[in-house]
Image (cartoon, rainbow, N blue to C red):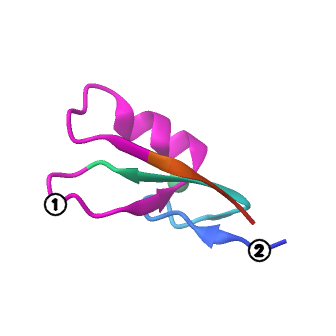
Amino acid sequence: MKKKECEKCKNNFRIMYRVQYKSDKIWVFLCNDCAIEVRRDNEDYRYGGTWKG
Ligand SMILES: [Zn+2]
């Protein structure tokens, strides 16, 4: 199984969430915990799918 590095916490995971969460509108991969964290009260948050390694 493949893993990806979370853009925020820099750990590697097999399941990642493709999201935008900053005003720069760049798609990044975040782990579940970080995706939940950045989603809170965030108008820039967009969900673009789940990646499974
Ligand atoms: Zn993370």
- Kindly identify the amino acid type of the residue bearing the numbered disc 2: Lys
Left or right of 36, for residue 3: right
Q: Residues within 10 Å of mark 1 (few under 14, many from 20)?
A: few
Is the residue marked by circle 2 packed among few (<14), some (14-19), or many (20+) residues within 10 Å?
few
Of labels 2 and 1, earlier in sequence is 2
Q: Which amino acid type corresponds to the residue marked 1 in the rendered image? A: Asp
- Magenta part of the protein: which range? 22-47
| Relative image position of residue 4 (x, y in whole percent) | 63, 70
Q: Is residue 5 left or right of residue 19?
A: right
Give the x, y percent position of residue 49. Answer: 54, 49
Q: Which residue is painted at 60% across and 64% down in the image?
A: 11
Whole-number angstrom distance, CA of label 2 to CA of label 1: 28 Å
Image height check: is 34 above or below 43? Answer: below
Quadrant of the frame with the N terminus: bottom right
Which residue is the site of mark 1?
Answer: 24
- Side of 24 relative to 4 (left or right): left
Residue behind label 2 places its C-beta within 8 angstroms of ligand 1: no
